[in-house]
Image (tube, rainbow, N blue to C red):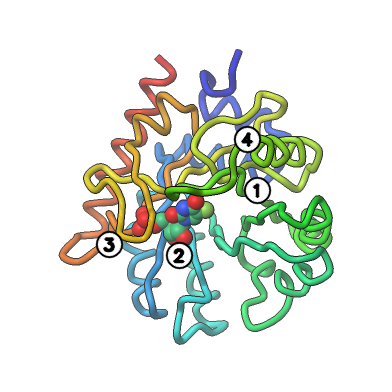
Amino acid sequence: SSFSRRTYAARAAEHPHPLARELLALMARKRTNLSVAADVATKAELLALADAVGPHICVLKTHVDIISDFDADLVARLQALAERHGFLIFEDRKFADIGNTVKLQYGAGLYRIADWAHITNCHVIPGEGIIRGLAEVGAPKGRALLLLAEMSTAGMLATGAYTEKNVEMAVANPFVIGFIGSRRFTEERDLITMTPGVGLHAAGDALGQQYRSPDTIITENGSDIIIVGRAIYGPGKDPAAEALRYREAGWAAYERRLA
Ligand code: 5FU
């Protein structure tokens, strides 16, 4: 039957990709399908947030190019927190250039993303060469890739035939373990969907973001992981308490799906 009706633990036991096995197994063990989108401005804020939400998350999603004082020490300390709390690191880089250029952007430069991000993602606008370029750098390091089959924003252009092409390319490329999008896209192999634009209160923001509930995303749409940002660390919020709230909502939605 559908992967959506199977437990994360059962899927972990059978997934062909080692990193996806590790992810699904830690989700089952920690009882969480929550990823926190840590869009903060400094090293100190990122480390404090990762430490506060670490016990509740399966994936920490980063945008390292936001961090004004990024350095190698930040990476070392994030990796230590990932070890201590048991989560994977997903750099939401959204690569979109030709294969040769993304190889350089992924492996080199200031950030050396492939050295520390378990997961990254790309648009397939350039065609399949972007996946091959990223795989040349990331696959030997045991990394994995998500394709942006959809986005969460109003008026986004990743629809219809474009989304279907993403699914075809994902199925055909073993370096790809899943998608950014709003739902389960295929039963061809157990590709994991992670969904941003999740919130329990606001409907959206002033710049096109749209929020849906964990129930819609996990129970109804069959996505696997909810990605939550400002709802967890916005002004006046207690990030650990909010992460716990979203973790419980996400897990309850998953249990309803299995029932
Ligand atoms: F691919 C996408 C997408 O379609 N929508 C998103 O919102 C990525 N995101 C990211 O999720 C975005 O870059 C933010 O890092 C995060 C959402 O943050 P929010 O504060 O929960 O709106």
Instruction: Rate crowding at label 3 as few (under 14), some (14 to 19) or many (20 or more) other CA atoms within 10 Å.
Output: many
Between the C-alphas of marks 4 and 3, the distance is: 34 Å
Q: What residue type is labelled 3?
A: Tyr
Which residue is labeled 1 in the image? 147
Q: Residue 7: image x %, image y %?
A: 51, 24
Note whether residue 86 is visible: no
- Indicate if the residue with disc 4 has its beta carbon within 8 Å of ligand 1: no
Note whether residue 3 is visible: yes
At a point 22% along the width and 45% down the height, the residue shown is 201
Q: Which numbered disc, 4 or 1, marks the residue closer to the eye? A: 4
**Is 155 rendered above or below residue 113?**
above
Q: What residue type is labelled 4?
A: Gly
Which residue is labeled 3 in the image? 233
Q: What residue type is labelled 1?
A: Leu
At a point 62% along the width and 67% down the height, the residue shown is 116
Q: Residue 251: image x %, image y %?
A: 36, 33
In which of the image's four quarters is ligand 1 placed?
A: bottom left
Q: Residue 52: image x %, image y %?
A: 31, 62
Between the C-alphas of marks 2 and 3, the distance is: 18 Å
At a point 83% along the width and 60% down the height, the residue shown is 136
Between the C-alphas of marks 1 and 2, the distance is: 26 Å
The quadrant the N terminus occupies is top right
